[in-house]
Amino acid sequence: MKEHLLEDKVMMMGKKVKNAIPLLNYLFRQPATTINQISESLNLTPKTSGLLISTFQEAGTVKEITGAARDRVFIFDPYLKIFRT
């Protein structure tokens, strides 16, 4: 699964790939997370983390589950689906 995501989604992110690979690795360890948690774990600014998670969201890699404007929680949906089936 990880290789598939790397090849199909992450490697297509252009300049963002430098931060996208660590984020993907982080999501395998922490499949439910917030922008602040990503910022702290990967030593990124909240703005960079937000832009990166938006890119992952557009690619269908993460899904926002709170519906809130602030303190949003994102889940690594393709990974969690494995455990639901």
Image (cartoon, rainbow, N blue to C red):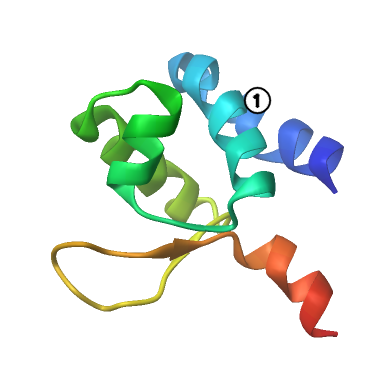
Q: Is residue 67 left or right of residue 62?
A: left
Look at the picture and state if 30 lies above or below 24.
below
The amino acid sitting under disc 1 is Met
Name of the residue lying farthest toward the left: 69
Residue at 27%, 64% (x, y): give it.
72
Residue at 73%, 61% (x, y): give it.
79
Q: In the rendered image, which quarter contains the C terminus?
A: bottom right
Element on which disc 1 rests: helix
Please name the residue that numbered disc 1 is placed on: 11
Residue at 35%, 47% (x, y): give it.
54
Residue at 62%, 32% (x, y): give it.
10
Look at the picture and state if 11 lies above or below 2.
above
Residue 74: x and y in percent read 43, 62
Residue 23: x and y in percent read 54, 34
**Which of the two residues, 7 or 23, is positioned nearer the viewer here?**
23
Residue 55: x and y in percent read 42, 42
Numbered label tally: 1
Q: Residues within 10 Å of mark 1 (few under 14, many from 20)?
A: some
- Residue 46 falls in which quadrant of the image? top left
Look at the picture and state if 44 lies above or below 38.
above
